[in-house]
Image (spheres, helix red, strand yellow):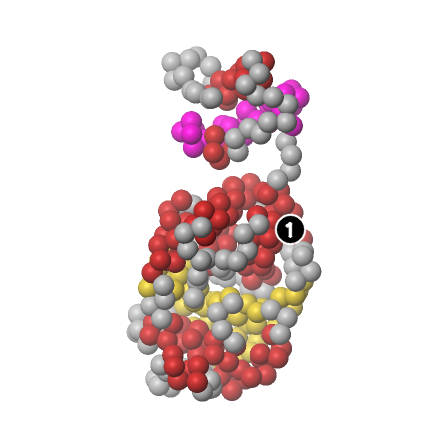
Amino acid sequence: MFRINPASGKAIYEQIMEQVKEAAWKGYLKPGDALPSVRKLALSLSVTPNTVAKAYQLLEKEKVIITIRGKGAFLAENAEKMGICLTDEQTEKFQTYAELLVEWNEKMNLTAIKEPREIAVKHFVDSLTIFSCIQPKKEAKVIDIGSGAGFPGIPMKLYREDLKLTLLDSLNKRLTFLGEVSDRLHLDTKRIHARAEEAGRDLNLRMKFDIATARAVAPLNVLCEYCLPFVRLGGIFAAMKGPNAEEELEGAKNAIQVLGCELEEVKTFTLPDDSKRAVLIIRRKKSFSGEFPRHGSKIAKKPL
């Protein structure tokens, strides 16, 4: 419907405005019809999103179109409730991420949560709450263990692009998805195909990260042996847990001590949908025995 004429003497945003008005006048666009999103129209016309956004803003000012608050506004508002303020560019990238998640979920099992507003709260806002607990230094080295569909690693990187993010997962097809997300969102990420207990013995990864994190991977007593080996001296493991965090902590105290770490803080909070969440901050105080991490079957059979 919309085309840009490079030979026209008019600005691109003006051409878009004129074509929207013409489409409405000729009946191609009827009251209540949805225009393409800013991102989709920008891609189809090979122009910047800012150009399309300017055209839409002026059309709205002239009362040619109206904007109905959608998924982007819903995400931004709910993130703000948790103390996280997103820019328009970040919100747009989160929308693209959600679209890719739904699209790829039809080909492989990435998430049971498929409704856009649930994705916004239960995946994106939940992942971003980690910043309510930690303030990573500039260019901090972060590893997301058992990253799966990219939570919390990708949302962390979208919010703080300076972070040096490594995504670790045992399934190559999930890493293929994460590669597509990284490319589409122009995110510089490192992706490693390995089991956590194997990667934790790799001297290029062992005790090399400022922050290790994991979400919905395993019980805390098991998770500690998977994740703590990656944390450098003075670094932290941010374990993202649900409402039973305190109960899990009781069973993980020995693992935390044996692996040379100390519990620093447990921060609990409630998501905008009333879900209960907790982030446990565990800091490395000293080194630990070379026998850890053990083989995965031993970790599962006899947690520390």
Percent position of residue 180, x then y: 38, 49
Amino acid type assigned to the residue bearing label 1 in the image = Asn
Name the residue rendered at 66%, 62% in the picture.
275
Evaluate whether residue 21 shows in this view. no
Percent position of residue 194, x then y: 33, 68
Percent position of residue 158, x then y: 48, 51
Name the residue rendered at 59%, 83% in the picture.
250
Name the residue rendered at 65%, 68% in the picture.
268
- In this image, 118 relative to 231: left or right? right
271 part of magenta stretch: no
Disc 1 target residue: 78
Image quarter for residue 173? bottom left
Image quarter for residue 298? bottom left
51 part of magenta stretch: yes
Evaluate whether residue 102 shows in this view. yes
Image quarter for residue 267? bottom right
Q: Is residue 286 above or below residue 266?
A: below
Name the secondary structure under disc 1: helix
Structural crowding at the residue carrying mark 1, measured as other residues with C-alpha within 10 Å and reported as few (<14), some (14–19) or many (≥20): some
Q: Residue furthest front?
A: 106
Q: Which residues are magenta?
A: 42-66
Name the residue rendered at 43%, 20% in the picture.
3
